[in-house]
Amino acid sequence: MSSNMNKFFPECQNILWTNGTGAAVAAGDLVRAGGRWGRATVSIANGATGVVMLSGEVRLVKGAGYTLAEGQSFGWDGGKAVDAGTVETPPAGRVVFACLSGDTVCIGRLEPVVPRAIKHTVTAGEDTANQVDIVLGTGRAPSQIVSVQVESTGNVRRSAAGAVTALSGGSLGTVRIVDAGFAAGEVVHLVTVN
């Protein structure tokens, strides 16, 4: 990155990212890197590795017809910044300066994604059903389920033995963990990235 770009976009966090999208990524494009949004700082051919900026302020093409308020979450529709409520993926960041409907660019701040840890005590009903549904309260499927562990009443941890899935449809924002070995009183430790 040039020294001028570093002055304009302070506090950046960069990673090396291997492009597995099937197409070349142009410098400045937003990409999904490690379960979060980042901005390619260089052009990256398919299969090649390049630097992606994960946090900091970025200048983005804005979708036509969207008015974005200062501080509002924005999403990415694959080519333009849009209202975060209009896309399925997690928000990419927050708008730094308000953008009017006719504006073609906006300044956004990519926000670091923090893993979220949730503890859930298994009830007798969940023990019988051999599944636990944990409602995340986000209204969105998590972008990544990092880990699931089950802690017995004797404080011994094990991995969940069955399927772990993010539900869709009317249950969006719920993670289902299936395990025939569930016992009432065990604690499920779930770590997700929204």
Image (cartoon, helix red, strand yellow):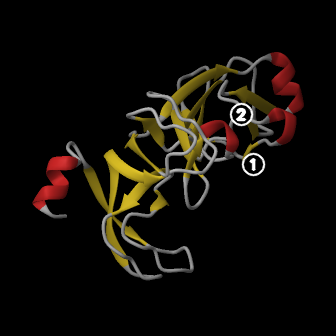
Q: Earlier in the sequence, mark 1 or mark 2?
A: 1
Q: Quadrant of residue 188?
A: top right
Which of the labelled discs sits on residue 163, or is there none? 1
**Residue under the image location 31 percent in, 65 percent down:** 41
Residue 152 on image: x %, y %: 61, 26
Going by the picture, which residue comes out furthest to the left? Answer: 3
Identify the residue under disc 2.
173
Q: Which residue is at 11% across, 59% downward?
A: 3
Which quarter shows the N terminus? Answer: bottom left
Answer with the quarter of the image where residue 158 lies: top right
Q: Which mark is residue 188?
A: none
Left or right position of 51 against 20: left
Disc 1 residue crowd, few under 14, some 14–19, many 20+, Cα 10 Å: few
The secondary element bearing badge 2 is classed as loop
Q: Position of residue 77 (x, y in %)?
A: 61, 55
Mark nearer the viewer, 1 or 2: 2
